[in-house]
Structure formats: structure tokens, C-alpha cells
Amino acid sequence: MAHITLHTLQDMKERNEKFVCLTAYDATFARFSSRAGVEVLLVGDSLGMVLQGHDSTLPVTMEDVIYHTQCVKRGNEGALLIADLPFMSYACATQTLENAARLMRAGAHMVKLEGGAWIADTTRLLTERGIPVCAHMGLTPQSINRIGGFRVQGRDPAAANTMIEEALLLESCGANLLLLECVPRHLARTITEKLSIPVIGIGAGPDTDAQIMVVHDLLGISPITPRFVKNFLLESSQGIPGAIAAYVKAVKEQRFPAPEHCYD
Ligand code: KIV
């Protein structure tokens, strides 16, 4: 696969061509996924739940994400590599710059951070210094104790309007990608149409510019199965590489997510 850059993803949005994202935590899965045509690999702090067995992403450290980013970088064959800034690693400016630089040195092409208006200054700070930012809105698992559980966000009109305004604000501050997690389909569609940057969805319906899944969900081996998850291993005759290829094909052909995977 040719090397995917932010320009590639921006061009795909403009051509209305869906792109595919998947979490990866090691070199082997990074190799399989990039060979199968996954355009974006995410070293997500979901590793705290699916690899380490915690009940949230809060215990994940910078050292954890750096280690897995180094592993994924070795196996990656051309995908854009995003690494998560974990809980409390971007609480103030100096700390943010230092930690984002550590992820970029480990092999990330971009960092992801969770939040709305409060990460606007941070987004500007990072992008002005050459570090691309993927903003993560909607259900933000690092704030799970404030949100009060893994639940759909932006259901009422006031919350939906705030999310739209904050997404536009982050774009104006330089965010290069937006990830929306667990929001109603119509809200994700509105935000995707209003923003010029590509929008990636998980539990956000089929109208975003791209989809992302946690690889353990795609293989049906996660302890919990939210509504938006599909087990692609069930339709693979070629094991794990076949399951990843089936996910890529289903997103590209706009067969996934189907109505039963969406919130309305
Ligand atoms: O950490 C992660 O894996 C994520 C996904 C849920 C998108 O942020």
C-alpha cells in the first residue's frame, strides 16, 4: 500500500470515498491490517481494557502507549499511524508538548486527544508546532467518571448543538481529523457535512467519512459487545487476515455499519 498521509485522507473525503481505520497494538496485527488496506492504524488507549484487562482506559500510561506505538510502527506497511495521548498526559501545555513529542519519536504520525472546547488551545499549540491532531468527541472514555457510564452522547438538542459548535471550533484551531464515538446517526451526519476535515465514526452511523473499530471487537473476542460492534471473523474463511479484509470491504462498499449498528 502506498504511504497514507493526511492529504490522502482529505482527498478521499472530497471524493466521497470511505476510508478504514482499526486499532493495532503490535507489529503482527499492524502488518495484517495495513496489507488488508486499512488506511489508519490507531494505538488506542483501549489497550488498557483489551490487553491489560482494566475496566476503563484511565490506568494507561505514556510508557504503555509508547511501547505499543514502537511495536506497531515496525509492522506497519504504509498506514497513517495515530497514537493516543492517555488520561492526564495533556493536562497542561508543557506536559502536552513533551508527551506528544515522545509519541511522535516512537513512530506516530499524529496524536489523538479527547475533549471539546477545552482542548482547543491544546490543539492549536500542537498543530502550530508540527504535530497533527485527531480530536475525539462524543463518548470520551477518559471522562467516564464525569459522564457516568458508556452511553450515547448528544441525544438532546442542546448537547447536539454544543457538539457541533465545539467540532467547528476544533477544526478552526487546526485539528486535522475528528473522531466521533457513540453519537446518534443524524448528529454524526450533520457534523461530517459541516466540517472540511475528515470525520471518523465508531457507533456514529454510516455517514461519517471513515469507520474505526477496536480489533478485538472485529474478531468477536471483547468481553462486552456494544450495539455498533460486528464480528467479522464469522464471515471469514481465512482467519484473522480474512476478517480484517472483510471489514475493509464492508466499509468501502458502505455495507457496514448497517442500521442495526446505529443509534437514532
Ligand atoms: O482507544 C481507542 O481504541 C479508541 C477507539 C474506541 C476509537 O479511541
Image (cartoon, helix red, strand yellow):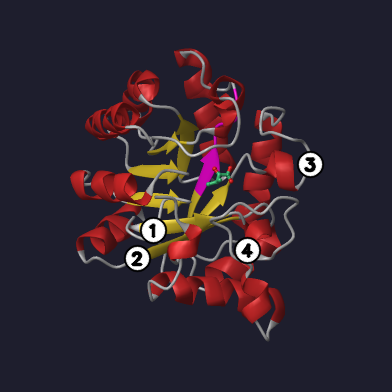
Pointers 2 and 1 in contact (C-beta within 8 Å): yes
The mark nearer the N terminus, 2 or 1, is 2
Give the amino acid type for the residue marked by disc 2 in the picture.
Answer: Lys
Give the amino acid type for the residue marked by disc 4 in the picture.
Answer: Leu
Q: Which residues are magenta?
A: 82-87
Distance, label 3 to label 4, CA atoms, is 18 Å
Extreme-right residue of the structure: 53
Distance, label 3 to label 1, CA atoms, is 27 Å
Which sits in the foreground, 72 or 215? 215
Look at the image and say whether residue 83 sits in the magenta stretch.
yes
The mark nearer the N terminus, 2 or 3, is 2
Residue located beneath label 4 in the image: 218
Classify mark 4: helix, strand or loop: helix
**Residue at coordinates 36% horizontally, 56% vertically from top-left?**
5
Q: Residues within 10 Å of mark 2 (few under 14, many from 20)?
A: many
Residue located beneath label 1 in the image: 210
Residue 194 seen in render? yes
The image quarter in which residue 102 lies: top right
Residue located beneath label 2 in the image: 18
Classify mark 2: helix, strand or loop: loop
The mark nearer the N terminus, 4 or 2, is 2
Pointers 4 and 2 in contact (C-beta within 8 Å): no
Look at the image and say whether residue 137 sits in the magenta stretch.
no
**Residue at coordinates 51% horizontally, 16% vertically from top-left?**
91
The x, y position of residue 22, in whole percent, is 54, 58
Q: Residues within 10 Å of mark 4 (few under 14, many from 20)?
A: many
Extreme-bottom residue of the structure: 237
Residue located beneath label 3 in the image: 52
Distance, label 2 to label 1, CA atoms, is 5 Å
Distance, label 4 to label 2, CA atoms, is 18 Å
* Quadrant for the N terminus in the image: bottom left
